[in-house]
Amino acid sequence: MDNNHENIKRRTDEDGVIFMSIKNEQTEALQESKDEDINILAIESSCDETAAAVVRNGREVLSNIISSQIALHTVYGGVVPEIASRKHVEKINVCVRAALSEAGLSLDDIDAIAVTYGPGLVGALLVGVSEAKALSFATGKPLVGVHHIEGHICANYIEYKELEPPFMCLVASGGHSHLVYVKDYGEYDIIGQTRDDAAGEAFDKVARAIGLGYPGGPKVDKAAREGNPDAIAFPRAKTSEKSYDFSFSGLKSAVLNYLNQAEMKGEEINKNDVAASFQKAVVDVLTEHTMEAAEEYNCKKVAIAGGVASNTALRERLEAECEKRGMTFYRPAPVLCTDNAAMIGAAGYYEYLKGNRAGMDLNAVPNLPLGDRERRYHGRSSN
Ligand code: KG4
Ligand code: ZN
């Protein structure tokens, strides 16, 4: 069963941006701050969520603020980078202030500032990076650069206080589909990735094609619950026997062809059946690769991360497959799967412990590869 412990306070600003403050039960039960505690102020702005959070010792979320622009981009059917950047500029200070105030801390209590600096939309990333650099410069607190996908993986540490590497993690988001062997904190082996579209991208494109709109993932997820997953036989792409890579563009084309043919023949389509059959094809491939990889790497722990990890069918399937094999399945609450800054605070904490610091020349890197330490730090590289 999913743990749905988060308590989300939500309001919509006059400009249509949804402002969320997420508290969980653990936050309520937090003890007083101790001298040895490490409080990280984290910032995330890689796509269409402006987010700030305060995370203690990598695992305890003192505050988690998300300002979501989804409503603004919906009319365009996807994220418009220029609009995203402008809204980040407007919202970032509000989010940072709210994160500190919800945590009951001031900048003096913060030990380091962590920020996503890639991958993502360059203009969007730059807003968070500039904010973090300004805060670091003004306070003299160290600056830590965080890889967005590492952040997604680290959402698991927040949800599961006991989880430690090594484990296998499926990361599926709007821009990425990776199968990652997490060897240790901050050490990742990518053992499979998408050759074309990311899983979330396929969800978004199929949703648009069947008229469900943006953002597609949650809408397909909902429609699929009313549909028959075996109604249409969509293909499952196998990149090769030896590879854990994914490919979703063939599946997306198969759905588009199916819709075109139905239209030409003047046949009604059942949107729920298309959604359910498409979703099953994605879930089959993601699950199969993840379980094969976990077996090959002898992992007893399997985790998921990224926006697609909030998909109901994927969570249920992986849970059942892990149970069959005596593996423990880790899945963060949906609000920790989609973009947020708490996950960046968790990843930033482990970077901080390793002594990794960014300089004032930290830049946004839109195509930052996972696990590439060479390009990661500019300027200072230790305490
Ligand atoms: O991780 P994320 O919030 O942002 C990126 O880093 O890309 O992921 C967003 C993606 C979108 O493509 C969205 O459609 C997908 O995650 N998504 C879902 C669900 N919720 C979000 N896909 C399938 N089922 C869902 N319930
Ligand atoms: Zn993301």
Image (tube, helix red, strand yellow):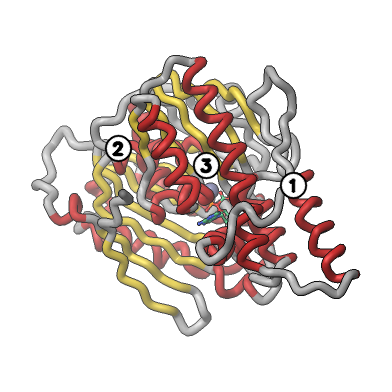
Where is residue 337 shown, x and y percent of the image?
44, 49
Label 1, label 3: how far apart the Cα atoms are? 27 Å
Q: Amino acid at mark 1?
A: Leu
* Apparent side of residue 7 relative to residue 187 in the rendered image (left or right): left
Q: Residue at x 30, y 37 (%)?
A: 58
130 vs 295: above or below: below
Q: Secondary structure at mark 2?
A: loop
Within 10 angstroms of label 3, few (less than 14), some, or many (20 or more) residues?
many
Give the image location of residue 359, x and y in percent. Answer: 50, 34
Residue that numbered label 3 is attached to: 148
Specify the amino acid type for callout 3: His
Circles 1 and 2: CB atoms closer than 8 Å? no
**Mark closer to the chain start, 3 or 2:** 2
Mark toward the start of the polypeptide (1 vs 3): 3
Q: Position of residue 9 (x, y in %)?
A: 31, 70
- Looking at this rendering, what residue extends furthest in the left direction? 32
Left or right: 78, with 64 as reference point: right
Cβ atoms at labels 3 and 2 below 8 Å apart: no
Q: Is residue 79 left or right of residue 227?
A: right
Q: Is mark 1 within 8 Å of ligand 1?
A: no
Q: Earlier in the sequence, mark 1 or mark 2?
A: 2
Q: Looking at the image, which residue is at 35% across and 73% down?
A: 10
In the orientation shown, which residue stands out farthest toward the right?
Answer: 264
Task: Estimate the spatial distance between the alpha carbons at disc 1 and disc 2, rounded to whole Å.
Answer: 38 Å
Q: Which residue is pictured at 34% across the width and 40% down the height?
A: 112
Disc 3: residue Cβ within 8 A of ligand 2's nearest atom:
yes
* Residue tagged 2: 58
Provide the residue designation for mark 1: 251
Residue 294 percent coordinates (x, y): 48, 22
- Element assignment for label 1: helix
